[in-house]
Amino acid sequence: MATDEDIQKAAQIIRFGGLVVFPTETVYGLGANALDAAAVHKIYALKGRPATSPLIVHVAGIAKARELAADWPEEADQLAREYWPGPLTLVVPKKPVIPDEVTAGLPTVGLRVPRHPIALALLCAAQVPIAAPSANRFTQLSPTTAQHVREAFGEETPFLLDGGPCEVGLESTVIAVTKEGLEVLRPGMAFVEEATKAVEPFEPAHRSPGQHRKHYSPRTRVLLVNHGHVPQQGRGAYLWIEHEATAARTVRMPAQPEAYAAQLYRRLHELDREGLDWIAVEFPPDAQGWAAIRDRLTRAAY
Ligand code: TXA
Ligand code: MG
């Protein structure tokens, strides 16, 4: 676990233009000073991420978020007060102080106050907003433990703050706050009732660049199955909720979406190391609470 001293060192690295890996309640982030274009460029280089994908900017509180927003609509303020600190990103018009490198040239910026105590302590110590995507290589699975990050980056792993396993386990809900209303750009485990009407879970708005179809993928082929119809060929794993089936490896997953989300990526990371021919996943119900999980599984299987 990261100590106070580690957090101070990480804050120093951020202020001097370097990269740091830090835990959030959703997934681990790969952070840099959001006001320093050269530092942000290092994130894209290490991830192998195209510069067309905007980054989320993490801040210590609502007041800091407002300092970076050119416009802060009443709806944004209400959502921020209700969900922050927490797994919700708000996309609002940006101030010029945010470099184009952060937002992939968009006039808007995604802002979030994370609730992991180490993330908050780092933001307070660094005294600058921190731009951070998930700490994985482009299109790979997001990391929910420090070990996942080390496996992804090996010797290239930047200074890392270990905060244990992530509590939520899936990336934040991303909501655009526009004059026309609220639009969900990426479903997550924070459910914003007022915005659900706008969601098209499997065709996220083209206005959210960076939401590539193939994303969040293990190396092993992922298949979505119903009623226990797993492949009959090869050695595979089966993640099931309700319908049991025979496979080399079977994992019973929780029937509650929060508990399911909290362990999904860890299970996929584990199974991905086993050299299996496939990972079959029972497709969860199209019901309240499962939208984000269905979205990530659909992308993993693409
Ligand atoms: O939970 C999370 O959100 C994690 C942790 C580290 O905070 N971060 C994360 O970042 O998942 P990333 O880079 O993997 O995903 C960011 C996504 C982009 O792909 C894009 O879809 C959306 O957020 N996004 C960010 N800024 C945006 C903007 N200005 N306009 C539209 N979409 C934006
Ligand atoms: Mg990511």
Image: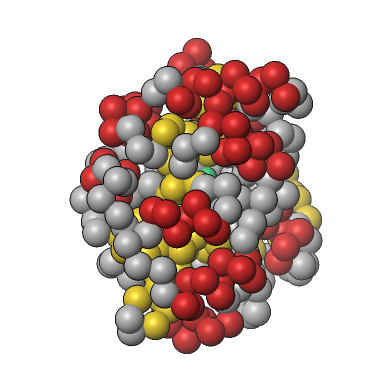
- Residue 7 location, quadrant: top right
For the residue pair 201 and 284, the one nearer the viewer reads as: 201
* Quadrant, the N terminus: top right
User: Residue at image x 66%, y 20%?
Assistant: 6
Asked if 247 appears above or below 220 in the picture, the reply is below
Residue 216 percent coordinates (x, y):
48, 48
Residue located at (74% from left, 35% from top): 164
295 to the left or right of 85: left
Q: Is residue 31 above or below residue 79?
A: above
Relative placement, left or right, of 111 versus 232 is left
Q: Give how far across and how far down residue 50 sits, in percent.
A: 27, 40
Is any atom of residue 301 visible in this view?
no
Residue found at the very far left of the displayed protein = 105
Q: Identify the image's colour scheme: rainbow, by chain, secondary structure or one colour.
A: secondary structure
| Foreground of the two, 175 or 294 | 175
Near-viewer residue (160 or 238): 160
Q: Is residue 136 above or below residue 295?
A: above
Front-most of residues 197 and 116 = 116
Measured from the top left, where is residue 217 in percent x and y? 47, 46
Left or right: where 176 falls relative to 119: left
Point 51% across, 67% down: residue: 187
Q: Position of residue 191 (x, y in %)?
A: 60, 73
Residue 118 image-quadrant placement:
top right
The image quadrant of residue 137 is top left
Q: Which quadrant, please, contains the C terminus? A: bottom left
Q: Residue furthest top?
A: 155
Q: Looking at the image, how many numbered discs can be counted on the residues?
A: 0
Q: Which residue appears at 39% of the width and 83% of the height?
A: 181
Question: Can residue 95 be seen by looking at this rendering?
Answer: yes
